[in-house]
């Protein structure tokens, strides 16, 4: 095994092709979905196309750099990335934490300049106003894969040592507030911990506590409670307020029929569908490409997730296995949550569809995780025989 671990070969080509195809398709669909909004708000229909293509280029460059450095060397930065995640998330969540919100000594004007409140949440760090920003929670997901994979591949598995950092970061994301991303982050961390060899029996009590806490947080928040009630009984929801978003999504998906209305022919993107190029972009895909086209997209994601878990299974060492498992879990969980929300199988959440939805933070950190995955595939045991 030690010789196999040291033998490198070309990366998994089908995996690489799958990533590139989905990325290119995503850029095209962002342009298609956003063309009306971009024209109305920014005065040019290519606004989001140019930005997303730029993020795609930066994402590919970042993935190539991570791949070149290699997952073993890059994993040494796990503590640094996790520390940066904690700082940014702490600053973003600070005003919403009851114990700490009165201890904020930064002048409110300066603070709001860097961490503005958008739609009732502080999820963004503004680097250059109107030009450059990023979501600390996306950095946190990437950091969790590096940190927990490195730690669990070297040390004895302690439940307390795992739940302190994972619970702390999940809590900070929750206080932004961003309930959906907090659940995704916690799920990724739990998947890595499980793959490291911890028995389900040992995780069961912690899982029950987390499930109870998740239910309590839903009940305690009027906004989340309304979303849950809309999910349970969508026909009873007010179509002009709480039920508007999901009803417009279902109208879009249902209008597509077997083969869709045709590329560029979406009606719901004409200011009917909220978050049309981000969280709701799959609804436009379903409307324009129909069941057949949406099925092909789902199949492409299924293939990518399968290849990611295959890389994890065939990794040459424990670190590679945990890194690949973390990336595969991230890809699978986020894809499933987004698609389930778009088909009313789960309550709506602000979770983007990887490689497809518009967004620089999501694109860059997702592509960096793909770079890690391709790096692990270079030392695949099966491929090197």
Image (cartoon, rainbow, N blue to C red):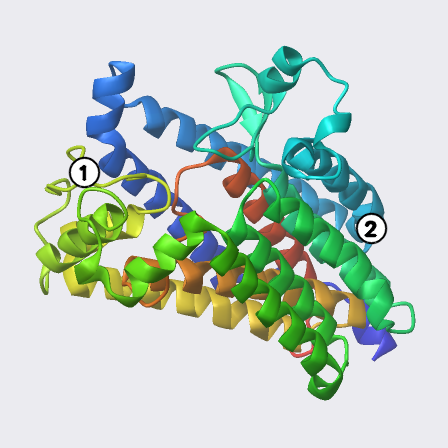
Q: Residue at x 30, y 46 (%)?
A: 281
Residue at mark 1 to residue at mark 2: CA–CA distance: 44 Å
Q: For residue 40, which quarter of the picture?
A: top left
Q: Mark 2 points at which residue?
A: 73
Q: For residue 158, which quarter of the picture?
A: bottom right
Which class describes the residues within 10 Å of circle 1: few (<14), some (14-19), or many (20+)?
many
The N terminus is located in which quarter?
bottom right
**Number of dots carrying numbers:** 2
Q: Residue at x 29, y 16 (%)?
A: 42
* Mark closer to the chain start, 1 or 2: 2
Describe residue 353's horizontal placement relative to residue 272 as left or right: right
The C terminus is located in which quarter?
bottom right
Describe residue 233's horizontal placement relative to residue 65 as left or right: left
Q: Reply above or below: 114 against 175.
A: above
Mark 1 or mark 2, which is nearer to you? 1
Q: Can residue 253 be seen in this view?
A: yes
Q: What element carries label 1?
A: loop
Q: Which of 343 and 242 is in front in this view?
A: 242
Instruction: Name the outermost residue toward the right.
Output: 155
Q: Position of residue 376 (x, y in %)?
A: 69, 62
Q: Position of residue 53 (x, y in %)?
A: 41, 32
Q: Mark 1 points at which residue?
A: 269
Q: Reply above or below: 165 against 279.
A: below
């Amino acid at each position: 095994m030690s010789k196999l671990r040291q033998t490198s070969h070309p990366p998994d080509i089908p995996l690489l092709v799958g990533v590139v195809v989905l990325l290119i398709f995503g850029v095209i669909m962002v342009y298609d979905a956003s063309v009306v909004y971009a024209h109305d708000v920014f005065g040019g229909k290519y606004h989001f196309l140019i930005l997303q293509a730029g993020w795609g280029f930066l994402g590919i460059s970042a993935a190539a750099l991570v791949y070149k450095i290699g997952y073993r060397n890059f994993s040494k930065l796990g503590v640094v990335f996790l520390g940066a995640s904690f700082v940014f998330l702490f600053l973003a969540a600070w005003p919403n934490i009851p114990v700490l919100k009165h201890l904020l000594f930064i002048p409110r004007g300066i603070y709001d300049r860097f961490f503005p409140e958008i739609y009732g949440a502080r999820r963004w760090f503004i680097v250059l106003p109107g030009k450059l920003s990023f979501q600390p929670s996306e950095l946190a997901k990437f950091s969790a894969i590096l940190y927990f994979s490195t730690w669990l591949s070297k040390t004895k598995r302690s439940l307390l040592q795992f739940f302190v950092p994972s619970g702390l970061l999940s809590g900070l994301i929750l206080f932004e507030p961003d309930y959906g991303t907090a659940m995704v982050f916690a799920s990724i961390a739990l998947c890595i911990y499980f793959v490291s060899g911890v028995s389900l029996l040992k995780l069961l009590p912690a899982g029950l506590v987390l499930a109870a806490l998740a239910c309590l947080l839903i009940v305690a928040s009027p906004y989340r409670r309304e979303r849950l009630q809309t999910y349970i009984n969508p026909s009873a929801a007010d179509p002009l307020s709480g039920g508007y978003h999901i009803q417009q999504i279902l109208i879009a998906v249902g209008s597509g029929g077997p083969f869709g209305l045709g590329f560029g022919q979406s009606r719901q993107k004409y200011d009917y569908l909220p978050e049309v190029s981000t969280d709701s972009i799959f609804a436009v895909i379903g409307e324009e490409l129909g069941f057949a086209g949406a099925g092909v997209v789902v199949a492409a994601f299924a293939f990518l997730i399968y290849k990611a878990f295959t890389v994890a299974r065939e990794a040459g060492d424990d670190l590679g296995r945990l890194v690949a498992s973390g990336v595969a879990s991230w890809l699978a969980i986020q894809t499933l949550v987004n698609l389930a929300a778009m088909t009313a199988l789960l309550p709506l959440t602000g979770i983007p569809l990887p490689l497809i939805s518009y967004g620089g933070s999501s694109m860059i950190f997702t592509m960096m995780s793909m770079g890690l995955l391709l790096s692990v595939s270079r030392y695949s045991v099966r491929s090197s025989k």
